[in-house]
């Protein structure tokens, strides 16, 4: 059985300044900027929430081909990312159960894969760093 741990949640926000104020001032999150897009990471204890600017436009690169692509509209939940010890094993297990892996490769945090649940919600897998 594959052990999954929550890695992070990605959200879109129409008003990034308002989102920043809410997460840092109302919820007391620690925040830091993210690279590559108008965005920030909010840390609530061990939970990391990546919040990106939602522009009301479609992503310029299809999400299936780019692990960094963010669905810019509508705002809200974009994806859940789970951490696994062995990405290859996890992807093989999912494929054996009929799950289509739409992307498998590398991004800034290491090996990454993406698939969708039956409702079309995007779920990412990231391989844990050696400890």
Image (cartoon, rainbow, N blue to C red):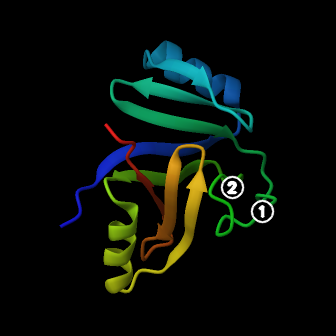
Q: SS class of the residue under badge 2?
A: loop
Left or right: residue 74 compared with residue 131: right
Residue name at image x 59 percent, y 18 percent = 21
Compare residues 38 and 85 and report the one nearer the observer.
85
User: Which disc is residue 69 wearing?
Assistant: 2
Query: x%, y% of residue 88?
Result: 39, 68
Q: Are marks 1 and 2 in contact (CB under 8 Å)?
A: yes
State which quarter of the image contains the C terminus: top left
Query: x%, y% of residue 85?
Result: 31, 53
Left or right: residue 53 compared with residue 115: right
Q: Which of marks 1 and 2 is nearer the N terminus?
A: 1
Q: Quadrant of residue 87?
A: bottom left
**How many discs mark residues in the rendered view?**
2
State which quarter of the image contains the N terminus: bottom left
Residue name at image x 39 percent, y 42 percent = 129
User: Which disc is residue 119 wearing?
Assistant: none
Q: SS class of the residue under badge 1?
A: loop
Q: What residue does disc 1 label?
A: 61
Residue sitting farthest toward the left: 1
């Amino acid at each position: 059985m594959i052990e999954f741990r929550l890695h992070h949640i990605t959200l879109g926000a129409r008003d990034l300044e308002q989102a920043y104020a809410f997460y840092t001032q109302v919820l007391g999150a620690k925040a830091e900027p993210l690279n590559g897009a108008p965005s920030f990471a909010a840390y609530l204890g061990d939970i990391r929430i990546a919040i990106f600017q939602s522009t009301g436009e479609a992503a310029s690169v299809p999400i299936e081909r780019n692990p960094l692509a963010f669905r810019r509209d509508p705002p809200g939940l974009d994806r859940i990312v789970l951490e696994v010890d062995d990405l290859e094993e996890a992807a093989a297990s999912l494929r054996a159960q009929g799950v289509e892996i739409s992307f498998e490769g590398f991004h800034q945090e290491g090996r990454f894969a993406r698939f969708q649940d039956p409702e079309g919600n995007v779920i990412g897998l990231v391989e844990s760093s050696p400890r």
